[in-house]
Amino acid sequence: MPLDPYDYVRIQAQLDFQCRRCGMCCQVADPIDIYPKDIRRLASYFNISAEEAVEEYTIPHPTEPDLRAFKESMPCRFYDDALKGCKIYRARPMVCRCSPFLSPGQIGLQGIEIYEDCPASADDLKRIERDLERLLNPDARTRKRLEKALSKMMQLE
Ligand code: SF4
Ligand code: SF4
């Protein structure tokens, strides 16, 4: 997977990210992309077959023919308003694991996307801007560490 310097910045930003558990992203994200690995994770979590997981929890993705999307979003059916958190945290999809700085579609694109709805990512942007020069020039060891972290987060298949 080809990475550009800003990708390394975003990987580090994701690793440093401290969610405030405001719950906003789980209430406004739509569609919530579901990859094949997400299906298998859901099936295992609910102890059902992959076919049942597809049927019960997903619909065709509105724009990506190779993906599915969660059946209910805005808010996500797994959002617990009382806890301000995810009811299936261990089995949450890839896009939720990669939020807010990384998502499968963003990797390889230059720039840092900030979700306006996420107060913590806006704060992180200020920190990133302050440290950008240092973050854009990671040494070889740091790059390797970040690539390893990325591949762990991005196990799509
Ligand atoms: S699966 Fe969990 S983390 Fe992802 S949007 Fe739904 S409630 Fe939020
Ligand atoms: S919007 Fe940002 S701070 Fe709020 S729950 Fe989502 S990731 Fe965390």
Image: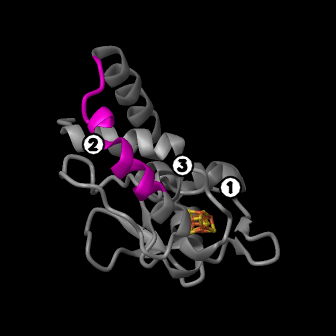
Q: Amino acid at mark 1?
A: Tyr
Judge: label 1 CB < 8 Å from ligand 1.
yes
Q: Amino acid at mark 3?
A: Phe
Give the residues in magenta. Answer: 124-139
Q: Which residue is mark 1?
A: 89
Mark 3 or mark 1: name the one nearer the start of the chain: 3
Instruction: Indicate left or right for 7 with 45 as reference.
Output: left
Give the residue at x 58% y 49%: 41
Measured Cα–Cα span from mark 3 to mark 1: 17 Å
Q: Secondary structure at mark 3?
A: loop
Judge: label 3 CB < 8 Å from ligand 2.
yes
Measured Cα–Cα span from mark 1 to mark 2: 25 Å
Q: Amino acid at mark 2?
A: Asp
Give the residue at x 39% y 45%: 156
Can you give x and y, in whole percent of width and height, for residue 3 in the image?
A: 21, 37
Residue 56 in magenta stretch: no
Residue 7 shows which numbered tag?
2
Residue 51 in sight here? yes
Can you give x and y, in whole percent of width and height, for residue 69 in the image?
A: 43, 71
Please tell me whether mark 3 or mark 1 is closer to you in this view.
Answer: 3
- Which one is nearer the viewer's eye here, 79 or 6? 6
Label 1 CA crowd tier, 10 Å (few <14, some 14–19, many 20+): few
Can you give x and y, in whole percent of width and height, for residue 53 in the image?
A: 57, 63
Give the residue at x 61% y 57%: 19
Compared with 46, 144 (above or below) is above
Residue 43 in which image quadrant: bottom right
- Which one is nearer the viewer's eye here, 111 or 155? 111
Specify the principal SS of the magenta part: helix
Q: Are marks 1 and 2 in contact (CB under 8 Å)?
A: no
Measured Cα–Cα span from mark 2 to mark 3: 15 Å
